[in-house]
Amino acid sequence: MSNYKSQDSRMNTKYAVIFICIVALVIIEKESNILSRVSDKLIQRQTPQQTLQTEDYNNPTHNDSLSVLKMLLSKLLGTKRNYSNLSDKLGNYSYSSGHKHILLMATTRTGSSFVGEFFNHHGENMFYLFEPLWHVERMLTLTTEANNGTVLAGIYRDVLQGLFLCDFSPLEKFISPQPQDHVTPALFRRESSVSLCEEPVCTPVITDVFERYHCKSRRCGPLNLTLAAESCLSKQHRAIKTVRVRQLDTLRPLVEEPRLDVRVIQLVRDPRAVLASRMVAFSSKYQTWKTWAQDGQVPEDDEEVKRLKGNCDNIRMSAQVGLSQPPWLKNRYMLVRYEDIARYPMQKAEEMYRFTGIPFSPQAREWILRNTQTTQVASGIYSTQKNSSEQAEKWRFSIPFTLAQVVQRVCGPTMKLFGYRFVDDEKTLINKSVSLLEERLFV
Ligand SMILES: *[C@@H]1O[C@H](CO)[C@@H](O)[C@H](O)[C@H]1NC(C)=O
Ligand SMILES: *[C@@H]1O[C@H](CO)[C@@H](O)[C@H](O)[C@H]1NC(C)=O
Ligand SMILES: *[C@@H]1O[C@H](CO)[C@@H](O)[C@H](O)[C@H]1NC(C)=O
Ligand SMILES: *[C@@H]1O[C@H](CO)[C@@H](O)[C@H](O)[C@H]1NC(C)=O
Ligand SMILES: *[C@@H]1O[C@H](CO)[C@@H](O)[C@H](O)[C@H]1NC(C)=O
Ligand SMILES: *[C@@H]1O[C@H](CO)[C@@H](O)[C@H](O)[C@H]1NC(C)=O
Ligand SMILES: *[C@@H]1O[C@H](CO)[C@@H](O)[C@H](O)[C@H]1NC(C)=O
Ligand SMILES: *[C@@H]1O[C@H](CO)[C@@H](O)[C@H](O)[C@H]1NC(C)=O
């Protein structure tokens, strides 16, 4: 009898604990990622023998909180019990209805504007910003004393954090001329952000003088940053594209910020293609490279070559950090090659959305269809490749072989990591039946 009783009260205690956990969880719901932080900490603190059954937790979807609850329950009540069917009992309720924060991290000429559009056109639940750090870079590299990589990285991070939280004030300090009453006509590439060009952020034009006030699709007055922040707060998800963050590990405090649920997508491209593309896009800046190509001689200790090497090393080191899945980045990092997007835009977009935990919207799908000349074959398989991969390979005919060789020497380890094949002679470089891309899965 007394045995029964004590068992009974033990059960009651257990249910009380479960109840408390559930209540706590519901309270935390809106700040759901706090819970995943807690669990990150828990997991970090586990000794190997104590390792919990966290297969569910490792799932990159928005199940985190539930899995963590399961984990906490099994921790509290003894690990013998199996709580994997807890979700059945609680139904389909989402425990992280929270915001997602996507950082598209790239370098110039890697297709990042294009990939940014995948998120820009997600629909009414997305607030997208195109290169806000442009302002910071411009102001700080002008004032040379702040032109220090460490300092710059910290400022980038703070500005990004502000923007992810819909606070424009850290950015505002860098906008020139200084906004008046939080209103500016000078936000870099405002028209590249759907949310900054739609109602109510788009305010009526007062005068017709300033062409640049106007968004592409409609004429808008100068940007009221207060309205922009309000719009940002009203959206479920936020995405920022940037080519200015050099090292992924400088973002650690941002990723660990408990008010954010950050996902980083690093976009990379064959460095030979990037150089070829930059030589066209930034023609005057790359004059030295053209001269070298003509001379057939490249001084490898030249600053230009060192800069190329520095860029490649930064990209590689960032990817190595991401791919090594440190606890702070677990399920928060994805590497994508431009070449794969060119070949399979729809599939890659789906993968990226799946990774972010944001539903792949019909609007985004529609935008991609329209802009990749993707034709949906009856079988449902997307056939796209011919055209966009042709575009993606054009560089093979524009880059002088000498320069391709320099890139291979200087960026060798980076190319190997991402699966870009080396060429030993010019014939191979321009032989289209030779693929320079190894099939790779980055997980
Ligand atoms: C939750 O995780 C399970 C596996 O742990 C997975 O099968 C399921 O699709 C996930 N649900 C959502 C809504 O992500
Ligand atoms: C828990 O139960 C589920 C089925 O409900 C089973 O698939 C899973 O393997 C079990 N986990 C453990 C650790 O026993
Ligand atoms: C899981 O479901 C089975 C069958 O419905 C049930 O017997 C078991 O007690 C459940 N486990 C938990 C932890 O709720
Ligand atoms: C849970 O989701 C599944 C599939 O999305 C659906 O069939 C089911 O009815 C849902 N259950 C509840 C309780 O909402
Ligand atoms: C950059 O600033 C940091 C912190 O103020 C300092 O430790 C470092 O030496 C500086 N680096 C350079 C190259 O000036
Ligand atoms: C900007 O928008 C806010 C919020 O609607 C408004 O209060 C403010 O007056 C606007 N600023 C200007 C200069 O119009
Ligand atoms: C391929 O792309 C080019 C430019 O992007 C376009 O002009 C051409 O019509 C496309 N060809 C096919 C077959 O879709
Ligand atoms: C191009 O490469 C293919 C496959 O290696 C080879 O068979 C072909 O002869 C090459 N074409 C030329 C023009 O070198």
Image: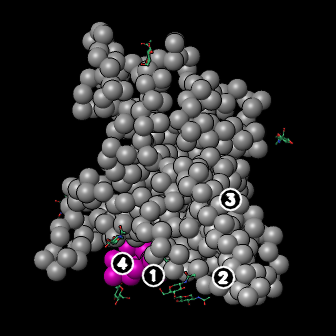
Front residue of this view, candidates 245 and 73: 73
Report x, y in % for residue 285: 53, 42
Ligand 2 within 8 angstroms of badge 2 C-beta: yes
**Image depth: mark 4 or mark 2 in front:** 2
Residue 352 placement: quadrant: bottom left
Check residue 37 in the rendering and tell me which mark sits there, or answer none.
Answer: 3
Q: The N terminus lies in which quarter of the figure?
A: bottom right
**Image depth: mark 3 or mark 1 in front:** 3
Separation of marks 4 and 1 at Cα, in angstroms: 19 Å
**Image depth: mark 2 or mark 1 in front:** 2
Secondary element at image label 3 = helix
Check residue 431 in the rendering and tell me which mark sits there, or answer none.
Answer: 4
**Mark 2 sits on what residue?**
53
Magenta segment boundaries in residue numbering: 424-439
Report x, y in % for residue 416: 59, 76
Q: Amino acid at mark 4?
A: Asn
Residue 401 can be seen in this image: no
Secondary element at image label 4 = loop
Badge 1, how many Cα within 10 Å: few under 14, some, many 20+? few
Let me know if residue 429 is in the magenta part: yes
Separation of marks 2 and 1 at Cα, in angstroms: 33 Å
Vertically, is 169 above or below 40? above
Check residue 439 in the rendering and tell me which mark sits there, or answer none.
Answer: 1
Check residue 295 in the rendering and tell me which mark sits there, or answer none.
Answer: none
Q: Residue at x 54, y 49 (%)?
A: 30
Q: Amino acid at mark 1?
A: Glu
Q: Residue at x 71, y 60 (%)?
A: 38
Separation of marks 4 and 2 at Cα, in angstroms: 51 Å
Q: The C terminus lies in which quarter of the figure?
A: bottom right
Vertically, is 77 above or below 191? below
Compare marks 4 and 2 and give the one earlier in the sequence.
2
Separation of marks 2 and 3 at Cα, in angstroms: 17 Å
